[in-house]
C-alpha cells in the first residue's frame, strides 16, 4: 500500500506519494489548504493509501512554535476525518530549504511546486527510517 506525505502550510499543502512497496517518494501536487480534505478523500481511495505522514515543523532547537501547534491541531482534525488511515507526525525541519536547493525557485510556479517537493523530502526521510526497522 502507498503512503502519502503532507507538508501542511497556512495557504498551501504539498503532497507526495510513495510507490506501492514504500521504497521511493515523489512529489504529487500542491493544493490550497482549504481543499486538502477534498483532495485526501479522492487520493485515499484512488491510491489505496494506508498511512499519511504529516510534516511536523519543530524549531531548530526541537521545540514547538505557533506553526507546530497549528499543524498538530490540523493533523488531529484529519485523523478524526479519516480514521481508517494511520497518521504519523514526522520531523520536517529544513525540508523547504532542501527543496529549494533541489529545484531552484525562479518563478511563481516553482515556488508553488516547492511545497510538493518538500513533502517528498519528508516522506523519503520517513521511508528511509522504515527500512531500518528490524
Image: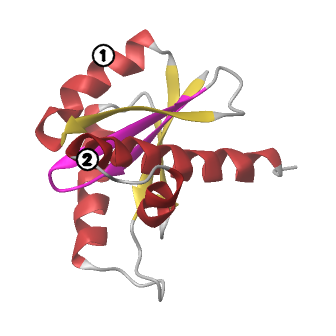
x, y percent for residue 7: 37, 50
How would you rate the neighbour count of disc 1 (Cα within 10 Å): few for under 14, some for 14-19, many for 20 or more?
Answer: few
How would you rate the neighbour count of disc 2 (Cα within 10 Å): few for under 14, some for 14-19, many for 20 or more?
Answer: few
At horizontal 42% and vertical 27% (from top left) the residue drawn is 84
Magenta residues, as a range?
3-18
The answer to whether one can see residue 92 in this image is no
Residue named by callout 1:
42
Relative to 25, say whether 47 is above or below: above
At horizontal 22% and vertical 76% (from top left) the residue drawn is 66
At horizontal 50% and vertical 60% (from top left) the residue drawn is 101
Q: Is 13 in the magenta?
A: yes
Report the mark closest to the observer, 1 or 2: 2
Quadrant in the picture for residue 87: top left
Q: Is most of the magenta stretch helix, strand or loop?
A: strand
Kindly identify which numbered label has been placed on residue 28: none
Relative to 68, say whether 23 is above or below: above
x, y percent for residue 132: 83, 51
Residue named by callout 2:
107
x, y percent for residue 48: 50, 15
Of all residues, the one furthest to the left in this rendering is: 34
Quadrant in the picture for residue 100: bottom left
Amino acid at each position: 500500500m502507498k503512503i502519502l506525505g503532507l507538508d501542511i502550510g497556512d495557504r498551501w499543502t504539498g503532497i507526495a506519494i510513495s510507490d506501492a512497496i514504500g521504497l521511493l517518494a515523489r512529489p504529487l501536487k500542491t493544493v490550497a489548504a482549504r481543499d486538502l480534505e477534498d483532495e485526501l478523500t479522492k487520493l485515499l481511495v484512488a491510491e489505496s493509501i494506508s498511512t499519511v505522514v504529516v510534516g511536523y515543523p519543530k524549531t531548530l532547537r526541537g521545540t514547538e512554535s505557533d506553526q507546530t501547534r497549528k499543524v498538530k491541531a490540523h493533523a488531529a482534525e484529519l485523523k478524526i476525518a479519516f480514521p481508517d488511515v494511520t497518521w504519523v507526525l514526522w520531523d520536517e525541519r529544513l525540508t523547504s530549504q532542501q527543496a529549494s536547493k533541489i529545484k531552484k525557485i525562479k518563478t511563481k510556479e516553482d515556488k508553488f511546486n516547492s511545497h510538493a517537493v518538500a513533502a517528498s523530502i519528508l516522506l523519503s526521510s520517513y521511508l528511509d527510517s522504515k527500512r531500518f526497522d528490524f
